[in-house]
């Protein structure tokens, strides 16, 4: 089935704390309406040329796209999630097989996911700070002792 006058509304989530995690999760949940009616068609997604699965939730009547990136390699910024129906995704796959540019294939819509970056902890961890303070106290004690003995 085709979707005329598609409209996407979305909410997105990303992992904000990268201190104890090895991967950053990117999750976008969106609703698709065709001619003002909630759509119930299979969808496909692509982010940066990488195909992603789109899952339809029966409870919320919305679609979900998600993927993981390693914390150290996870980029920050806006991600364009291109959403395709059956025909559009078939055209993308055909263009890829033929070595053609896929940007000529119009997506059903585009969802923007913003990832501001993950917090990876303080610049200096607490163990290093404790060692620096201990050496500072030791230096102060030794210099004070030397001055008192002189």
Image (cartoon, rainbow, N blue to C red):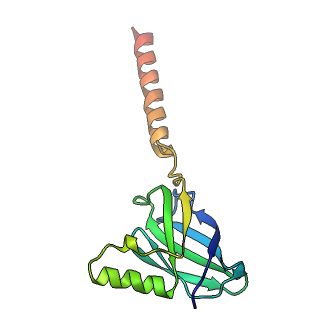
Q: Nearer the viewer, residue 111 or 19?
A: 111
- Residue 27: x and y in percent read 57, 70
Instruction: Check the image and report above or below for 81 versus 52.
Output: above
Looking at the rendering, which quadrant does residue 101 occupy?
Answer: bottom left
Q: Nearer the viewer, residue 129 or 118?
A: 118
- Residue 37: x and y in percent read 72, 82
Which residue is pictured at 49% across the width and 62% down the height?
79
Instruction: Check the image and report above or below for 52 versus 71.
Output: below
Q: Residue furthest bottom?
A: 1
Which residue is pictured at 37% across the width and 83% down the height?
93
Q: How many marks?
A: 0
As drawn, is 57 to the left or to the right of 55?
right
Which residue is pictured at 73% across the width and 85% down the height?
59
Quadrant location of the C terminus?
top left
Q: Nearer the viewer, residue 57 or 99?
A: 99
- Residue 74: x and y in percent read 44, 60
Q: Residue furthest top?
A: 150
Quadrant location of the N terminus?
bottom right
């Amino acid at each position: 089935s085709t979707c005329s006058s598609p409209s996407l509304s979305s909410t997105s989530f990303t992992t904000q704390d990268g201190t104890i995690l090895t991967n950053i999760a990117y999750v976008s949940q969106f609703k698709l309406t065709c001619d003002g009616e909630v759509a119930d068609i299979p969808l496909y997604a692509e982010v940066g040329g990488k195909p992603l699965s789109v899952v339809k939730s029966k409870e919320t009547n919305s679609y979900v796209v998600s993927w993981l990136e390693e914390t150290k390699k996870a980029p920050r910024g806006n991600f364009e999630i291109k959403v395709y129906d059956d025909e559009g995704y078939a055209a993308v796959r055909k263009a890829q097989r033929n070595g053609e540019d896929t940007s000529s294939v119009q997506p059903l819509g585009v969802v923007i996911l913003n990832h501001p970056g993950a917090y990876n902890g303080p610049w200096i961890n607490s163990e290093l700070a404790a060692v620096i303070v201990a050496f500072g106290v030791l230096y102060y004690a030794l210099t004070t002792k030397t001055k008192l003995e002189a």
